[in-house]
Image (tube, rainbow, N blue to C red):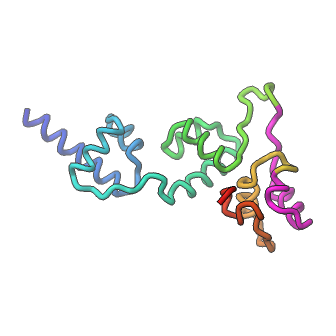
Amino acid sequence: MKAENNGKAARTRQAVKLYEAGLGTYQIGQKLGLSQPTVWRILRLQGVEMRPKGRPKDEERSNEAARLYLSGLTMEKVGDQLGITRQRVQQLLSGMGVLARSPTGRHGVPRPDVTIEKVVELRRQGLPVHKIGMILGCGHRLVMLRLKEAPPIELVPCPHCGGSGRVGR
């Protein structure tokens, strides 16, 4: 019984240490073989200050997910690298306006190749971000992502979202 308690204590210390290092409860659960609710319970019982859901880290994670996915990785591989599920990757990409590739390339319309050069060329013509997205067949958040990757050019914010990527303020 004492060895079992020592194992639990070590796992509790490890969970707290990983959370404070920035890992999420899902990632900690995977590493320690625990369910996500169990990780939450352990952390709460230890008095750990929990990060709010929807934290600013999500924007960074969304940008990284889009960069990896657009580099050719599958959603599963992106999820593995970021420590999140394929479904969460899909949610993040969808929120950014990134269209999913067809698994076989035979179904539906293939995703357009949205390059920085194409986006900058259209932007220099004075087109608003949402129009560029319509022309290239992608969301305006992907256009904004490409513009952030491009060398600095004078931007006129999208009249619909002001450049935030959120329509309907």
Q: Examine the image and state in which quarter residue 31 appears.
A: top left
Residue 64: percent from left, percent from top: 60, 53
User: Could you say which is closer to the camera, residue 135 or residue 18?
Assistant: 135
- Does residue 64 lie above or below 102 as drawn? below
Q: Examine the image and state in which quarter residue 117 appears.
A: bottom right
Q: Examine the image and state in which quarter residue 148 appears.
A: bottom right
**163 with respect to 87 (left or right):** right
Q: Residue at x 82, y 35 (%)?
A: 110
**8 with respect to 73 (left or right):** left
User: Could you say which is closer to the camera, residue 43 or residue 168?
Assistant: 168
Residue 81: percent from left, percent from top: 53, 44
Q: Which residue is drawn at 41% across and 42% down?
A: 26
User: In this figure, what is the number of numbered marks?
Assistant: 0
**71 with respect to 130 (left or right):** left
User: Which image quarter holds the C terminus?
Assistant: bottom right
Residue 8: percent from left, percent from top: 19, 40
Q: Which residue lies furthest to the left in this view?
A: 2
**41 with respect to 156 (left or right):** left
- Does residue 169 lie above or below 139 as drawn? below
Residue 113 is covered by the magenta coloring: yes
Residue 79: percent from left, percent from top: 55, 40
Q: Which residue lies furthest to the right in this view?
A: 125
What segment carries the magenta color?
109-133
Q: Which residue is drawn at 39% across and 37% down?
A: 30
- Does residue 79 lie above or below 63 as drawn? above
User: Could you say which is closer to the camera, residue 120 or residue 6?
Assistant: 120
Residue 94 is covered by the magenta coloring: no
- Does residue 9 lie above or below 3 as drawn? below
User: Which image quarter holds the N terminus?
Assistant: top left
Q: Residue at x 64, y 37 (%)?
A: 74
